Amino acid sequence: MPFSDFIGNRRIVDSIQRMLAEDRLPQTLLFAGPSGVGKATLVRYLAAAKHCTQAEADFCGKCGDCLRILALDLSKDEYVKEHEERVKLPAAKRGENPLILSTHSDFLIFPPDGPLRMIGIEQARQLNKAAQYAASTQGGRLFHIDHADRANDEAANSLLKTLEEPAPRLTIVLTAENAYELLPTIRSRTVPFHFSPLTTEEMAAFVEQRSDLSADERKALAGWAQGSPGRALSLDVDAYLARREHLLALLDTALGQASFAELIAHTDAIGRRQQEKISILVETLHGLLSDLLHLRLGSGRLVNVDIREELRELSERVNFEWVEKAARDLDELQRLERRNIQRQIAVEALAINWRQRLTLS
Ligand SMILES: [Zn+2]
């Protein structure tokens, strides 16, 4: 299972491999880019390559070191459950036992923890302490700070100590969706690699693995997953279609195609779909907005190819400025997610604001 198995972002993978071969891997790296494009996977591959006894500047995926390192995949059920269990603990208990995951003595992951999914000061202190120990094996050590943009200021400032003077033979990889949400003092100490969403062709390879879907659904899925193989593998098609129908109703109202009264049944349904996080609603809406813009400009690939005609009609009612402002509202909504806002009210507020902007423009 070598580096060549990694799908997408080939330039990044090649340069990592080249730096490994020439023994000039930077001590602190930043993998930035959208969720689900394989940032954490590449961190595991990198850790495996540093320890694999069977391959040079690559890894076999079969030796003991490889197996232990590759097993630490946080998207696995056992780690998702562990996080859910920790959310139930009082904050003080989590602080006493900071979350650090490891299946190999030289590979440690520091992921966000608790109901707010933050990296806290106790985890940063543990990292600083752990950084002082020497590696137990030839390959050196690798720490992965997962979602480093979720470190609060106190934790980030504490991490600076280790980043300013990295211990010998310690590699630290930070992953983050948005590099610019990191403190500039942290960002400037890393060598950044910016990951892109996958191309349509690259996505097709992933979508083939979904044998539970029809050929038509698989074809559409490559778009719905918005260039993210992680999403293509996990997307619940029925839930996506239901969610999209409600959000299309929101756009219909916002763009003056339907009355506000017609929207209520849909926002009501959104309010009842409690298991869906705000971030999932935002992501689906982002996809619809970007489609409107692409149709308007006559460029780019669509997320929702299967409803092209319906979207084309809507797109005739928007301009670039309207879409841009709407996308900014969504970013704001995403930021409010952690404050437990009432989603039905939030979605209705979007419809009202967007409709108002339409009449103004
Ligand atoms: Zn190996």
Image (spheres, rainbow, N blue to C red):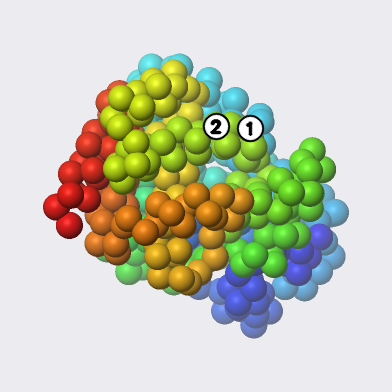
In the image, 36 versus 308, the foreground residue is 308
293 up-or-down from 328: above or below: below
Residue at the (50%, 69%) spot, across then down: 300
Q: Amino acid at mark 1?
A: Asp
Residue at the (28%, 30%) spot, across then down: 260
Disc 1, SS: helix
- Verify CB contact (< 8 Å) between mark 1 and mark 2: yes
User: In the image, is the residue at mark 2 within 8 Å of ligand 1 by its beta carbon?
Assistant: no
Quarter of the image that includes the N terminus = bottom right
> Which residue is denoted by mark 1 in the rendering?
238
272 up-or-down from 99: above or below: above
Left or right: 250 in relation to 299: left
Tell me, yes or no, if residue 89 can be seen here: yes
> Which residue is denoted by mark 2 in the rendering?
242
- The quadrant where residue 271 appears: top left
Left or right: 63 in relation to 26: right
Disc 2, SS: helix
**Residue 204: image x %, image y %?**
72, 60
Residue at the (27%, 38%) spot, across then down: 350
Tell me how far mark 1 sits from mark 2, CA to CA.
6 Å
Residue pushed farthest left? 360
In the image, 164 versus 247, the foreground residue is 247
**Residue 171: image x %, image y %?**
53, 62
Point out which mark residue 299 bears.
Answer: none
